[in-house]
């Protein structure tokens, strides 16, 4: 009897365990999965952001600079050079032959109109001063002869033809004196007595920018190179060799930006004042002249320059070096410094890209700090980080 009761208990226990197991299996099949709340989901890092510690060694390989705005260019930079403003420049030659005995004008010296540049020992000048003195004396004598002839004619002491001859001689003496005085004026000299020391004077006020002579040198009036160049260095010209395909981008009064190797990143502004009326048949270029203000005296004649016609509109665009641009497919990107060690990749739209710089039309504001060197390394670092997150 006891054995039968024990058997019933065991069977009952097995049936209960089977029922419980079946219940849990059914509940697992019909119960929907539990989805974790958004607050507890894992946060994926920004795929366009790179973060470094403030003292990370990678930062030493980057160059970061604030973006500056410049007028929008109409074409790529053109080859040009800085020249003298010929309207404010005098190339001084000697009108006489001779030997230099003293030089007063030195390079960089400010001179006024009429200041001495050099003293020349010139026999030709002695002849000119002698002719002037003789013309003075001859005119004085001819005036006396005329006055005496006129007095004698009034008392019937001489014939009329003698008076007429005296008048002719007087007129000739006056003409000779005018010629001699004009010669002395042309030499910018006036000597009371004959002398062979000619003083070459500055024809304009300005600065001596070139001197091509030495003391004791023999010079001639038909020399091919000037002795001095006197100019106003605060006003210069810029000459452009303009390809004919860009002629429609340049107009009188238009603005240009000028850059030279001596001052990287600095831009000078000029204005178009003359455009050649014909094309050079050999170079297929058109000469364009621009006037520029050189008050700071940074620019020098004969400097090579990169000259860019720019829009006259007041709006300006951010300009970035090409080394700061990362190109992926059809799109361009720039890395922006958000804070120390935090760099954000941003897509930008370019207006124009030249050999050194690009102008950003959309996606960048002046004053933002961008990576100008090391952008490719950053892009590789960003790609590696994104691959690691995906894996």
Image: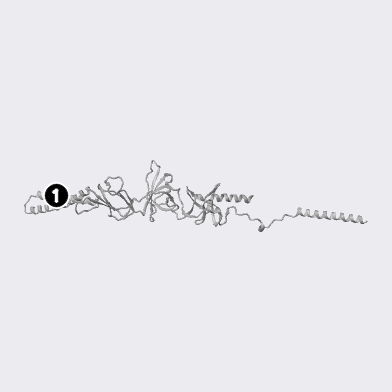
Horizontal side of 389 relative to 286 (left or right) equals right
What x and y, as percent, mark residue 45?
Answer: 61, 54
* Residue reaching furthest to the top: 282
* Residue reaching furthest to the front: 216
* Residue reaching furthest to the bottom: 39
Q: Which residue is rendered at x = 78% and y = 55% of the image?
A: 24
What x and y, as percent, mark residue 200?
Answer: 26, 51
Q: Quadrant of the N terminus?
A: bottom right
| Of 386 and 33, the residue lying toward us | 386
- Number of numbered discs visible in the structure rendering: 1
- Secondary structure of residue under mark 1: helix
Is residue 289 something one can see in this rendering? Answer: no
| Of 71 and 254, the residue lying toward us | 71
Is residue 80 something one can see in this rendering? Answer: yes
Q: Which residue is rendered at x = 57% and y = 50% of the image?
A: 381
| Of 165 and 4, the residue lying toward us | 4
Q: Label 1 belongs to which residue?
A: 169
What x and y, as percent, mark residue 198?
Answer: 24, 51
Q: Which residue is rendered at x = 87% and y = 55% of the image?
A: 10
- Say few, some or many: other residues with alpha carbon within 10 Å of mark 1 (under 14 / 14 to 19 / 20 or more): some
What x and y, as percent, mark residue 344?
Answer: 56, 54
């Amino acid at each position: 009897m006891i054995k039968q009761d024990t058997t019933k208990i065991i069977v009952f226990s097995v049936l209960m365990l089977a029922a419980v197991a079946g219940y849990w299996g059914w509940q697992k099949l019909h119960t929907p999965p539990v989805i974790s709340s958004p607050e507890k989901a894992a946060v994926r890092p920004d795929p366009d952001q790179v973060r470094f510690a403030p003292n990370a060694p990678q930062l030493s390989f980057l160059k970061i600079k604030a973006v500056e705005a410049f007028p929008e260019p109409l074409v790529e930079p053109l080859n040009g050079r800085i020249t003298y403003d010929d309207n404010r420049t005098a190339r001084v030659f000697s009108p006489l032959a001779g030997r230099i005995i003293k030089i007063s004008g030195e390079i960089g010296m400010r001179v006024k109109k009429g200041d001495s540049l050099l003293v020349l020992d010139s026999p030709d000048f002695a002849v000119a001063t002698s002719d002037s003195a003789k013309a003075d004396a001859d005119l004085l004598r001819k005036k006396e002869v005329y006055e005496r002839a006129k007095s004698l004619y009034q008392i019937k002491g001489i014939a009329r033809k003698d008076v007429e001859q005296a008048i002719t001689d007087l007129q000739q003496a006056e003409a000779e004196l005018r010629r001699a005085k004009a010669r002395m004026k042309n030499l910018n000299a006036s000597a009371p007595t004959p002398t062979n020391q000619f003083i070459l004077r500055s024809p304009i006020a300005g600065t001596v920018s070139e001197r091509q002579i030495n003391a004791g040198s023999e010079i001639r009036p038909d020399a091919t190179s000037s002795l001095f160049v006197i100019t106003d260095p605060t006003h210069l010209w810029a000459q452009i060799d303009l390809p004919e395909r860009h002629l429609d981008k340049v107009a009188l009064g238009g603005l240009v930006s000028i850059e030279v190797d001596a001052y990287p990143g600095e831009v000078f502004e000029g204005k178009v004042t003359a455009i050649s009326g014909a094309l050079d048949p050999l170079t297929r270029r058109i000469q364009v002249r621009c006037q520029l203000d050189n008050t700071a005296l940074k620019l020098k004649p004969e400097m090579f320059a990169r000259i860019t016609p720019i829009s006259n509109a007041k709006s300006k665009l951010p300009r970035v070096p090409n080394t700061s641009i990362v190109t992926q497919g059809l799109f361009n990107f720039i890395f922006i410094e958000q804070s120390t060690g935090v760099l954000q990749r941003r897509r930008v739209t370019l207006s124009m890209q030249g050999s050194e710089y690009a102008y950003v039309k959309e996606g960048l504001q002046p004053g933002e700090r961008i990576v100008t060197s090391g952008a490719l390394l950053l892009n590789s670092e960003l790609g590696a980080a994104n691959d690691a997150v995906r894996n």
